[in-house]
Amino acid sequence: MSINFILLATVGILMAAGVYLFLDRAITRMLLGLLLMGNGLNLLLLLAGGPPGNPPIWGRETELFENTADPLPQALILTAIVIMLGLTAFILALAYRQHRYRAGGDQVQDDPEDLAILRRQLRDPAQAPDRDRSDDPTTGRPTEAGDQFGPESFEKPVETAPETADQTEKEEKNDN
């Protein structure tokens, strides 16, 4: 089987450009990077699918090719296109929502929780990521207080206000 090096170089360029754009902090560039990587992967699947051939349908043989084309790479590419379309729609919805509710550009902001983890002191066992506030701050071991889960910490059910109960009785009388 001969390999088309021009298409293989195109796959490499698409994947490299896609990774470069995907590592940016702007959502639109992330989307473009994801699309380029998806197209590079589809082209790679097409190259790995083997030589061209007759359509994989009975009774549709032509004299141009001796063998039938492999339908599996075509099915995988079609599935990848559909998945990329759904993912593109989702990312575009996220970008639109961010544009609507934030006055800035489409840069992804730093997460305050990530900054808090970055600033924590490594020697303090109470600040370890697997601890909570009920642990002993000096040793980092769980205390008897725990997280205080149980029936007394659950929310009470919402009770209907007496005004609404009176209104429903009046409405029932009016219906009769």
Image (cartoon, rainbow, N blue to C red):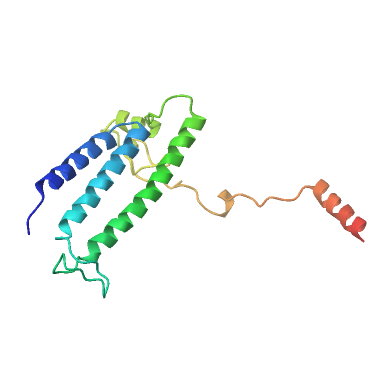
Left or right: 93 in relation to 120: right
Q: Residue 126: image x %, image y %? A: 34, 37
Quadrant occupied by the N terminus: bottom left
Disc count in the image?
A: 0
- Residue in the foreground of this view, choosing between 162 and 4: 4
Relative height, residue 47 to residue 105 (above, below)? below
Residue 43 rendering spot, x and y as whole percentages: 21, 50
Question: What residue is drawn where x is 18% and y is 45%?
Answer: 11
Q: Residue at x 46, y 47 (%)?
A: 147
Considering every residue shown, the one lying at the far bottom of the view is: 59
Residue at image position (20%, 55%) is 46
Frontmost residue, 69 versus 38: 69
Q: Looking at the picture, how far across and down is residue 96, in whole percent?
A: 47, 36
- The quadrant of the image that shows the C terminus is bottom right
Quick check: 11 above or below 17? below
Above or below for 54 versus 149: below
Place of residue 167 in the rendered image (x, y in percent of width and height, measured from the top left)? 85, 50
Front one among 40 and 113: 40
Q: Quadrant of residue 47?
A: bottom left
Q: Is residue 151 left or right of residue 126?
A: right
